[in-house]
Amino acid sequence: MPHPLTTPISTVTEVSGSGTDALMTCSSDENICTWVLEQTGSQPLATVSDWILGKPSALVGLILIGLIVRWLLHRVIDRVIKRAEVGMLPNRLSRAISGGRVGAALNLTEDPGYTRRVQRAATMGSLLKSIVSGVVFTVIALMAISELGYDIAPLIASAGIIGVALGFGSQALVKDFLSGIFMIFEDQYGVGDEVDLGEAAGTVEAVSLRVTRLRDVNGTVWYVRNGEILRVGNMSQNWARTVLDVKVAYGEDLARVQRVLSELAHDIWEDEDFKGRVIEEPSVWGVQELGPDAVVVRVALKTAPLEQWAVAREMRARIKARFDHEGFEVPFTQQVVWHREAERPQQQASDEDAQPPADGPAQTEAGSVTT
């Protein structure tokens, strides 16, 4: 039979042992804490080791993972942008244009279309890289906060509320940015293009995600918000066309007029000064309109971008000189002016002569009688 004093002592030992086991615990994901606790049996040492070694190493690992993911995504974007720079060309020719002796020998990189594609691709690449970096760093920041033991659910909920508030409060700003992104991706216009945006028309000087800056023919600089642009008329993409309506009198021989216009258009097409400006054989479309005082004959020339106005001015000058030489009559509007002030005195005098005075005959008779 055990001694009466031994029972309380053993009970105290068991209770203290079970309390020690309850305190000596680590989370399932705290590997360093668990390993130190198994090796030393000290809960404070395991906790300190986890905060000194475990947490920093986890944060460093997250940062490294974020940097690696960001680098890989940037490499993918660079490859996509490289392909966008050379356009829809075969792979071998694309590599020649991208760099190398063949591309330098052919001077393909000096093509305005190629330069435009490079600028557009660089803009898209910069935008995509900024978006990727922002998303990756945001995710890594949330994961780091969660690793430190904080609950990120309130942060995510707050971010959603802030996003909704900003969406309602800055709808115009968001609309401008989204419109700018789509304009850049779709290549609606670029720097140096002649565009018509409705309220403003001129040469584009700068394009950003929020506003477009252009200068009109009078030198006025216009700042147009991208979200307010409903339509874009671009006069400098791929090719342009000079369309001239020439008026001649009804008495002229239309076949001869069309032959002269065709000769003038072909002279410009074959002129060395206009090589590369007129890119297709000109054509006379024929009679465009029968007006009240003239017959309208239309001639068209397909030109390089932004060259249609210079070609039109030169064509008008040559038409004027040739028509004068051929003796063609160019009708012009005539006006008839009536000077009614000069007619009023004559009309009044004629009215007075036609109307005899009331006592005229009596005076005449009386006079005749007197004599």
Image (cartoon, rainbow, N blue to C red):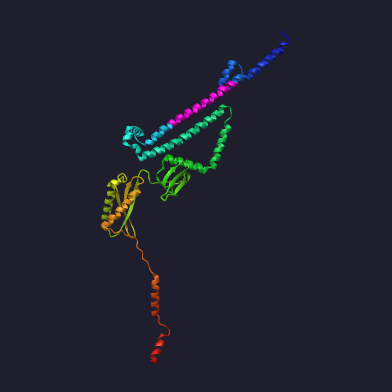
Q: In this view, does 79 lie to the left or right of 32?
A: left
x, y percent for residue 127: 46, 36
Q: What's the residue at 46%, 29% (across, down)?
A: 71
Q: What's the residue at 26%, 51% (across, down)?
A: 263
Kindly tell me whether residue 298 is visible in this rendering. no
Q: What's the residue at 57%, 19% (across, down)?
A: 34
Extent of the magenta region: 47-75
Q: Quadrant of residue 92?
A: top left
x, y percent for residue 236: 38, 45
Look at the magenta stretch and give its main secondary structure.
helix
x, y percent for residue 13: 68, 14
Q: Nearer the viewer, residue 181 or 313?
A: 313
Q: Return the residue found at the far front.
A: 219
Q: Is residue 114 left or right of residue 261?
A: right
Q: Which of 233 and 337 is in front in this view?
A: 337
x, y percent for residue 41: 61, 16
Q: What's the residue at 38%, 90% (across, down)?
A: 368
Kindly tell me whether residue 370 is visible in this rendering. yes
Number of callouts in the render? 0
Above/below status of 178 relative to 312: above
Q: Return the residue found at the far right.
A: 4
Residue 286 shown in magenta: no
Q: Return the residue found at the far top.
A: 1
Q: Quadrant of the C terminus?
A: bottom left
Q: In which quarter of the image is the N terminus?
A: top right
